[in-house]
Amino acid sequence: MSERISREELVRIYNIEITFFDDLVEYGLLHVQTENEVHYLLYEDLPDLEKFANWHYDLEINLPGLEVIHNMLKKLEALNRRNRELMNKLSAISDQYEDI
């Protein structure tokens, strides 16, 4: 089982409001596991929580804004990945023609 941390611990450690955490879950920005009515976040999702908390508290970005930024960054990452794939294919095709 993956390591995880409870919502209550996260709120205390990161000094965030519990409602902010719950709103991130409600918006689908964080995914939690629930066991015995305790909500847990996987350690692998901590960077996302930190990013959202920084954007929200430091830059005063509201939850709809966080959602938009997060979705745009995911799309940008996907486009960059696709661009690398296409560039690799183009390079391979170019190499084939150089051998002719």
Image (spheres, rainbow, N blue to C red):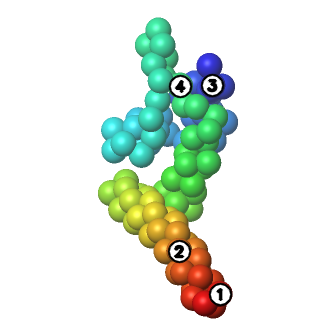
Q: Residues within 10 Å of mark 1 (few under 14, many from 20)?
A: few
The answer to which of 80 and 8 lies nearer the viewer is 80
Residue 25: mark in rendering? none
Q: Earlier in the sequence, mark 1 or mark 4?
A: 4
Q: Earlier in the sequence, mark 1 or mark 3?
A: 3
Would you say residue 21 is visible in this rendering? yes
Q: Is 90 located above or below residue 46 in the figure? A: below
Q: Position of residue 36 (x, y in %)?
A: 47, 9
Q: What amino acid is labelled 3 in the image?
A: Ser
Q: Residues within 10 Å of mark 2 (few under 14, many from 20)?
A: few
Q: What amino acid is labelled 4 in the image?
A: Tyr
Q: Residue at x 65, y 87 (%)?
A: 99
Q: Is 49 located above or below residue 9 in the figure? A: below
Q: Earlier in the sequence, mark 4 or mark 2?
A: 4
Identify residue for label 3.
Answer: 2
- Helix, strand or loop under label 2: helix
Q: Give the CA separation, mark 2 to mark 3.
A: 36 Å
- Helix, strand or loop under label 1: loop
Q: Position of residue 39 (x, y in %)?
A: 48, 23
Identify residue for label 2.
Answer: 89
Q: Give the CA separation, mark 1 to mark 3.
A: 49 Å
Q: Give the CA separation, mark 4 to mark 2.
A: 42 Å
Identify residue for label 4.
Answer: 40
Residue 99: mark in rendering? 1
Q: Give the CA separation, mark 4 to mark 3.
A: 11 Å
